[in-house]
Every structure is written in C-alpha cells, then in structure tokens.
Amino acid sequence: MQRRNFLIGVSGTAVAGSALLGTGAFSRVESHRNVQIQVADDSEAYLGMVPLETLNSQNYVSTDENGHLYIQIDGEGNQQGEGPSEELIGTGVNSNSYTYFDGMFDLCNNGKADANIEYSLENANVLENDEPDEPTFAFYYIATEDDADPAGTRVLVNEDQSVPLEVGSCITIGVRTCTKGIDASDTPLVDGPVQVIADSPEAGEPNEESNGTPTSTPDNT
Amino acid sequence: MQRRNFLVGLGSASVGGSALLGSGAFSRVESHRNVTVEVAEDPDAYLGLDKCDTPNGSYVDIDDNGHLEILMNPDNPTIGESPLGSGVNSNSISNFDNVFQICNQGKEDACVWIADDDAWPTVPEEETMGGERRVEFYLNGFRDQSVIGEGNGISLEVGECVCIGIETRTFDLAEGDELLGELDNQIQIVADVDSECGTEPLDCPVLEGEYECTLYESSETDGEITSWNRSATKFRVTNDGPNTEFSLAVADSPGSWRPDAEIPADASSTFNADASFPFSALIAWDPGEECRDQLIEANPDLQTWSEYKADNGLDNLDDWYETFGTSGIPSNPDPPEDLDDQLIVQVQNIPEEGQGTSPEDRIGPDEEIDNSLYPQMSQEAMNEGWITCEAFNE
C-alpha cells in the first residue's frame, strides 16, 4: 500500500492503482452503514482495568454497577464480596508512614497497537505531606526481567510519567501512600477521580507490521 | 395510406385497413425492460468504503453482504485472534484515528460527509463535554475537523480516498450502553457531486420588524396632567444573526428616516420613529454581497430594494415616501434619493396597513387622549390594533 499523504482541510489520500478507477459515474450516493460502539466493563474495555484475586484487590478494588473500576481503602474492606465480612479490619493507612499495596489491579492494553500509559490526579483532592519529593498517592508496578529495574522491584510511577504497555499485554499495578506529616483525621487522604491516559500513536498510522490501540482517557475513582 | 374522414360531433372515424392501427399515440404503455444495476461490495462501489490500512482499521468489518460496518463491541471479528477489548471504556474520551476510508470511485469530483441527524445523541449537559456529540467523526487524525454535516464535507477528487477517525465520549454511560443507539446504530455516508463542499453557510444578519406601540407625551395645565399627545411610534426590530446596521424608513406622518441604526447579534430591540401615525415602514440593511445572495436564496420573503421597487412600481426612495405617505419626503435627517441595492423587509403589524383605505380615511392612533382615558385609547383606534406604549408595557 502506498503511503498516504494527508493534507489538512483539503482531503485525502492518493490511491494508486487503476483498478479502483472508474467503472461509473454517480450524482449522489447515500449509504447507511452500521456503527456499533458499545461501552464495555473496564475489565474488558480497550484500556482494560481488571480487579485481581489478590487479597489487596479483593479488599480494596472492585468494579461498580456501571463497569467502572474503583479503589476504596477505608474501613470497609471486602470490596469484591469474596472474603469473610465480619473480620476485624483496619480503617485506613498509618500516619507518618509509607504503605504499599501490591497487586491492586491489572492494566491491560486491549487496543490495536502499543500504548503509553499515564495518570493524573488533577481532579482529585489529595492531602499534602511533608516530603517534597514523595507524592502522597502514587501507583507503581513490579519490575519483571524485561524491565530496566531489577526484577521484583516496586517501580514508582509519578503523575504524568509514562509507562509503555505493549498491545495485548497487562501490568499489575500497586498503590503506595506516603503520610509523612499527615495525622489521622476524617479527611480522606485521596478523594476523587484518577484520569488514566493511554496514548497509542501508531494505531492510526499505516500498518507496517500489525498492531493497534486507541488512545483513551478514562476517569476512575 | 387511406385518408381518414373525421365527422365532427359524431366522433368516429372510418378506418379502412387494420394496418393503420397501432402506428400512433398512446395513453399508457407498460413495457417491462431489463435494467441491470449491479451492487458492488462496498470496497469496489462507486462510493468506495473500506477499512483503513492502519491498526485501527481492524475495528471495521465488511459483512456478508459486502457492507462496511464498524464494530467496537464484542462482535468485532478480530477478537479471538488476540486478547483484545470488547468496547470503549466508560467515562472516557477515546480517539481512533484513521478507522475507515471513503473513496470516490465515480467519474466526477464529489463532496463526502456523514449526514447529521436531529437524533444524534449528545453527552448530558452536566457531564464533562456536556452537549457534545457522543460520537464524532473526523478527518484522518485531525480530531478537531469534524466531517459530520454537509458544511463539513470533504472534497474528493475522482480516485481519491480519505480516512475517517472516530472520537467517543462515554461520560455518564455504563457497561453495555450503545453510543449510537438513538440512531439505530446507523450513520449515513453521503457523496454528492453537486454539493459545494466545505463551504459552511455564512452567518448573516436577518432582520424583522413590527409595530409595537405608540408613544404619547403629557400636556399639563397648572401643573396637572390634562391630556396626552401622540408623539412617536415604537418599532421592534429582531436580528437573527450577527450585529449589523440598518435604516428604518417610515411613511408617515410625518415621514421619518433613521439611518445607521445598530442592532447587536441575535437581539431584539425597539427603535422610535417620529412618524406617529405610520402607514408603512421598511427596514433596509446591507449584509454584504455573499450574505445577500445566500439569504435571498434561503428566504423567499426577503427582497432586494430593486426587486421591491419593481414589484411596487417605484422609481426610488423619494417615490416610496410619496406613494405610501401623505406628507412627502422627510427631512432632518434627509433620506438619500434612493437606496443601494440592500435587503428590504417590510415592517409587520402596522394597523390599517394594506386594507386599501386611503390615508385620509384611516383612523390612526388618537392624536390626543384625555387623561381620564389614558393609557387606553378610543375604542375605535384600539379595535384597529393601535395601543399606547403605556398600555402595551402593562
């Protein structure tokens, strides 16, 4: 296939090949075509967000009735309804501490091409801590043998840092909180939506090998 | 061939020979003929529809009937080969650049677009991107360049193709919802060789005017109001379009001319004219040549000044004042002898206008109203439709 040159505002693509050209004239064509675009549960959407069967995930992560993944770390626990409900459980993270929650959910690229994933807490209320370089709330993933960091390391991903995610693959995401200088109170440490942005620049480019993903910016609370 | 003799009144002809029959006229013939129109599969049709050669092209399927369809749902046929998703995320904006392509495989250049629809679903106002379309179709990867509606049409030369991208906005939707359900999951792709492509209709001022009420001034004796005297007429002018200047000509009485009145965009304002017993009034404005042509084509009630003059047998503006008024051409300010070829609209709802009553026999708003009656008028005048502004505002 010839590479296409796109001209803004003018139009299209030069298609080579006389086979396409002209068997007939038309004055006007109106064609109805099906376009079926459906909202999927987060676990199956193009940017997949999947609660796991780990204890952390079962306690703190689930998908609501609209198919939105959410994280809830408070006194309730048992978000997935899997565990014993009467058990004594904590009501929050410790003050003046770092807390890590491994294995909270999987982030999957169910699109059509490799993607870069970022997140933003821009629209969430986050309490400030005393550590200038340590965010109060951040996601991390566990490095594998393919990563630059030693396998098994928790690799913290700060807001607006980008993590590559191959098409068809998933990474397991954890949550870390830093409560240095924050005392226990009724105000939640973090409250609000997290915006996750998956950018897949190659999905709309001409095929070279095969691959693809949409870019997507879901909000998930 | 034998000559036929027609007998008037009897209506019959003597026909001598059957060979004559059947060589002449007919009222109705039914003949069945073959018309061969082949239906091509979409990729090969005159309006060629196919997937783009991109990863996102795999959201497109050509179904068993050769029809292009876009499947961002569990039916997407590429599922199964790889662990791909079954739909868009909820509460999200998703962009899919270069999904399907439209090709002009006809014999003339054409304009292509996706037909807009009143039922096109939008995001609820209170949500992110409230009021925007649930699904937007755009050119290539140019996410701001919609191709919905004829005004956003893309010009395609013969043999040329263009890829279309899709943006979805799923705020306030939940798992299983279909974004184009209100359109029965169908869009209409249009290609037209006669369309003036990519030229959006201009935003042009369209003015209308109507009589609103008559203004009165009080006259006093020994500091007491005794009566009210007719002083001016209030007209309401409505502008459906960008701000513009206009002139208001009123005949009569006395005649008045108001040049360079201004009205803001999409506004309705009142304008007073000294003519307190109007017989007829015109609003004239110059929207520019392109707007003038567009408006006249779109609105058969609008006329240019030259058309108006021709319809009414007038020579110029002076002639208009003399024809429709009784007191000749107004002064201070003086109207021009004639108008440029502006757009003209007649002011509506002027009582007694167009009834064919000669000016001297018309009733008109009362010249003077006793304070005991004001803000009412004489029943006679009110029956005609005249009203004081004091009464109108109540």
Image (cartoon, grey):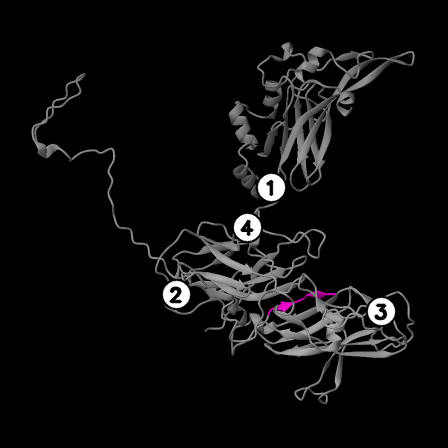
Q: Secondary structure at mark 4?
A: loop
- x and y, in percent, of residue B109 in the image: 43, 56
Q: Amino acid at mark 4?
A: Asp
**Residue A160 visible in the snapshot:** no
- Would you place residue B202 above or below residue A146 in this image? above
Q: Residue B65 location, x and y as percent?
A: 40, 61
- The residues colored magenta run A214-221
Q: Which residue is mark 4?
A: B116
Q: Is residue B227 above or below residue A166?
A: above
Q: CA distance from mark 4 to mark 3?
A: 46 Å
Q: CA distance from mark 1 to mark 3?
A: 61 Å
Of the image marks 1 and 4, the number of the one nearer the N terminus: 4
Check disc 2: other Cα within 10 Å, few if <14, some if 14-19, many if 20+: many
Q: Is label 3 in a helix, a strand or a loop?
A: loop
x and y percentages locating residue A6 in the rendered image: 53, 66
- Indicate the chain on which mark 2 is placed: A
Q: Quadrant of residue B379?
A: top right
The amino acid type, in three-letter code, at marker 1 is Gly
- Which one is nearer the viewer's eye here, A84 or B124? A84
Residue where numbered disc 3 is placed: A189
Q: Nearer the viewer, mark 3 or mark 2?
A: 3
Q: Which residue is mark 2?
A: A20
In this rendering, is residue B282 above or below B328?
A: below
Residue B58 is inside the magenta segment: no
Where the C terminus of chain A falls, by quadrant? bottom right
